[in-house]
Amino acid sequence: MAEQALREEGTQPLFEMIAHVSVQDPSDDEAIEKASEKSSATCQDSDSKPAVKKKRKQPTECFLSQPEEKQESAVKAKRRKKKKISDVLQKSAPKPGVPADLQNLLNQHFGENRSVIEIEELKLSDSCFLPANDLTHSFSSYLKEICPKWAKLRRSHKEKKSVVMLVLCSSALRSLELIKSMTAFKGDCRVIKLFAKHIKIKEQMNMLEKGMFHIGVGTPGRVKALVEQDALCLNSTKYMILDWNWRDQKLRRMMDIPEIKKETFDLLEKSIIKLCRDGSVKLGLF
């Protein structure tokens, strides 16, 4: 009996402990779940915060857009800057024009719209040219060199609506300068101004029809207009001089000005090149 009583006393606390462990309050489970949810939420927050900081530390889009804008602005600046004639001349001394320069420009101007046969008809041999100016001559000294028998040609010229020598330059002001500078050469010959500034074409047509002139100095556009209207005849012309090497305030030659260049080549194609190939006209580059 005593042993049985001890067994009952020893087992009673064990049963109470088991009951206490096995039987739990449902509120305790809810508390545990809430605690686990809070801990998981805090873990998620702690994991997400560094990711946000990384995005702020690496503004990749802003960093990449800046150099692209700089490159685009640099390209635009390069496109706007074009080489000027003055910049080219500052680096190298101007070279005197030669007959090959004129022939190359003729081929470039007519090459795109002409056939091979037509380009061949525009070619000029060396015999068509006078000696070119080497930049050491004045206009009078150059004319004396290329035309030593000028006095004889001047006296024998009797035809109206024509000139013995035709000088083409880029502007009216340049034409006046050349007329003044040829006083030592022209002698008793008469010079007519063939440019548009302050002179109407009808006045020039009347002067050519009524008077006799030996030298005509003017611009290619006005000369071409007079030739097309049969006011100026080139059959008596012996010399045609291009004011090739002179440069204006912008350092442009007459062939550097698109309008002057086009009018000059149109005049050469329609009237002068054929006369040069026949041997009646000589071309000179001053």
Image: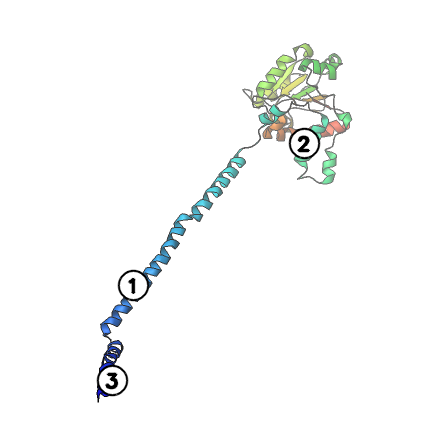
Q: Camera-side residue: 281 or 22?
A: 22
Circle 3 crowding by C-alpha within 10 Å: few under 14, some 14–19, many from 20? few
Relative vertical location of residue 136 with respect to residue 222 in this rendering, above or below: above
| Precedes in sequence: disc 3 or disc 2 | 3
Q: Which residue is mark 3?
A: 7
Residue drawn at (21%, 86%) of the image? 5
Q: Position of residue 216 (x, y in %)?
A: 65, 19
Residue 98 placement: quadrant: top right
**Neighbour class for label 2 at 10 Å: few (<14), some, many (≥20)?**
some
What residue type is disc 2 on? Leu
Q: Residue at x 58, y 25 (%)?
A: 86
Q: CA distance from mark 1 to mark 3?
A: 46 Å
* Spatial separation of the CA atoms under disc 1 and disc 2: 88 Å
Secondary structure at numbered mark 2: helix
The residue tagged 2 is 105
- The quadrant of the picture occupied by the C terminus is top right
What residue does disc 1 label? Answer: 38
- Is residue 276 placed above or below 38 in the rendered structure? above
Left or right for 152, reference 246 = right
Q: Position of residue 80 (x, y in %)?
A: 52, 34
- Specify the amino acid type for callout 1: Lys
Q: Position of residue 49 (x, y in %)?
A: 36, 55
| Mark with earlier residue (1, 3) | 3
Discs 3/2, front? 3
| Image point (63%, 19%), residue name | 217
